[in-house]
Image (tube, helix red, strand yellow):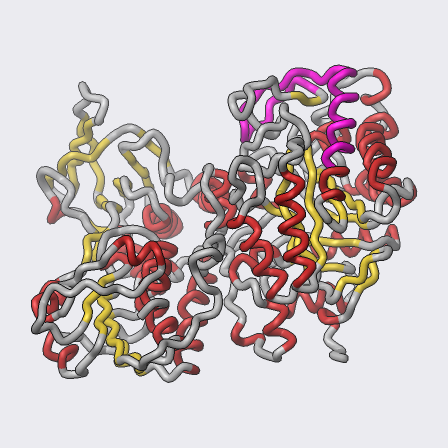
Amino acid sequence: MSNDPLLQPYQLKHLTLRNRIIVTAHEPAYPEDGLPKERYRAYTVERAKGGVAMTMTAGSAAVSKDSPPVFNNLLAYMDEIVPWIREMTDAVHEEGAAIMIQLTHLGRRTRWDKGEWLPVVAPSHHREASHRAFPKKIEDWDIERIIKDFADAAERMKAGGMDGVELEAYGHLIDQFVSPLTNELDGPYGGSLDNRMRFCFDVLKAIRARVGDDFILGVRYTADECLPGGTGKEEGLEISKRLKQSGLIDYLNVIRGHIDTDAGLTDVIPIQGMANSPHLDFAGEIRAATNFPTFHAAKIPDVATARHAIASGKVDMVGMTRAHMTDPHIVRKIIEKREEDIRPCVGANYCLDRIYQGGAAYCIHNAATGRELTMPHSIAKADRRKKVVIIGAGPAGLEAARVAGERGHEVVVFEAANDPGGQIRLTAQSERRREMISIIDWRMSQCEKLGVTFHFNSWAEADTVQAENPDVVIIATGGLPHTEVLSKGNELVVSAWDIISGDVKPGTNVLIFDDAGDHAGLQAAEFIAKAGGKVEIMTPDRSFAPEVMAMNLVPYMRSLQKLDVTFTVTYRLEAVEKSGNELVAHVGSDYGGIAKQRTFDQIVINHGTIPLDDLYFELKPASSNLGEVLHDQLIAGRPQTAWRNADGKFQLFRIGDAVAARNTHAAIYDALRLVKDI
């Protein structure tokens, strides 16, 4: 038996967990009609195949109709969910893993205009900033109803074969009762800590009475809200002890912080550029104080940190949830002594930010996650070896090279720059996005193992490519900044890339016109402001940086607000002209009726990229498919069979920003779904 602390089994009541790594509860937003159908099941089962001890589904499943699915949650209040739960639990158990589900009533952490348009309920009328709904103050009959709903839902989950249920307390209705900041009730459920905890214990008693003792029951709760007037550390320790002493639960799942604002949520679940495992020591204090099984997860992205968490006795089970979205086979690779092959989570938080914006969770650099029904996590060998020539070593080109190498093909990559990475290498120059370079480093490491040949400092011409006698040519040359967006004065502006790369010195009074809304605009603003420049970010949109999304925006705002950066929305830069040593910006509005002039010494444009596609069009006449991609075959996962030129010597494709400006995930997805069938 291995002496690796992570690989030791753990006995949780009657349940033997095969190692110490879990996937904690999270909602990937894959339900269909509130049910965990094929897609949800495939996603969950993949992590069980990868060796995880236990996976927790839902983050979290709604127990009542007045807890509508604001994150496309599972609907645990429907009887129809039971057979779908059974199919999923059976499949996970067959892979040797345990499975639990998280149940909740969201309380005020939702919206009244979702689901059945029922009033949001909470122990006060205080609105949660993130979801903006003003709640109805909960009544006695609401409390009775919701307690029963919890018990009914738990009974459904047991009938569906779950090993247990976890209650989501932090930020949700149970915590809204516990926190003095959100509980303004009188009588048995308000006031003293005894009263504020009564709802939680009533729910636990009702569930335990319904499911019996041979069913795991846990609570994920905040033991320190980190808010003035809220549940503090001392009271959190007392809450932890009372939960243990109740005899109703089998473990504690510790959270530190609050999630009622984007900033609070991001401190609970940190993103790239923020410290790893910031709450692990705190979880260890809870475990030491209670001597009770303790689980914890919060930006524990790497095996070394997880191993330390277990070996040091800080926790009994360590959650690596986003890490398993990036690589569902972490445990298997640990067992096989292949830790260097683990695809690293880079903390980009594309997964969670998409959920909170109403989308499905996708990993920024594993396009198979959430697409297990159509995309492979492990690449199969091709029937026939081909020669694949790839132009460009950015994220799209490197993913194409990796997948082609896994397929067993001979792969040659040409890259004009000294180093791989493309736009990733550029964005990683910012300290807060430094972790992004792991997207490139991991692929380079994999490609080297697969024998991929690289030619750096090589500007590939059509003759260069054709001299390789390729079977397939993939153009992944990316794009160049598009700054020609003005009616006049395009030659007077610089790009956000110019600033980030250091090719252009920052000005002292700078306008950044950003209608791409991605990281580059904010990165440029931060570079300039830190250099001492006065910065204004202007966008014609209703909000700035929409592609950055909520949690990623938090660290930028903390920095840019301190640097006194100004944000201006709903105005459009139309033209620029020179006046002495100054630049005059002509500003209008898509809403009409506005014409302003403003003076700056530097104007920066962030308007995405235009494809660097000259080589593609040079090669197109010599290709057998004339560059055509048959979309039906691409979507269905079948090889490309377009044949438009009998004299063509090779298939030609282009991917990523060489097609159109999109993002890193799109570039990697382009590569995976095309090359997996070559």
Q: Is residue 329 left or right of residue 55?
A: left
Q: Considering the image in quadrants, where does the N terminus appear? A: bottom right
Q: Quadrant of residue 155?
A: top right
Q: Do we see residue 577 in this rendering?
A: yes
Residue 589, position in %: x, y? 22, 26
Badge count:
0
Q: Is residue 559 left or right of residue 481?
A: right
Question: Residue at the location (78% across, 27% down)?
Answer: 147
Magenta segment: 124-153
Q: Is residue 128 magenta?
A: yes
* Foreground of the two, 87 or 360: 87
Q: Is residue 584 left or right of residue 57?
A: left
Residue 637, position in %: x, y? 35, 60
Q: Do we see residue 278 in this rendering?
A: no
Question: Residue at the location (64% across, 53% down)?
Answer: 298
Q: Is residue 184 magenta?
A: no
* Foreground of the two, 577 or 38: 38
* Foreground of the two, 312 or 495: 312
Q: Considering the image in quadrants, where does the C terminus appear? A: bottom left
Residue 95, position in %: x, y? 65, 63
Question: Residue at the location (71% across, 49% down)?
Answer: 100
Q: Where 360 falls versus 678 (above or below)?
A: above
Residue 340, position in %: x, y? 54, 76
Question: Residue at the location (19% across, 27% down)?
Answer: 588
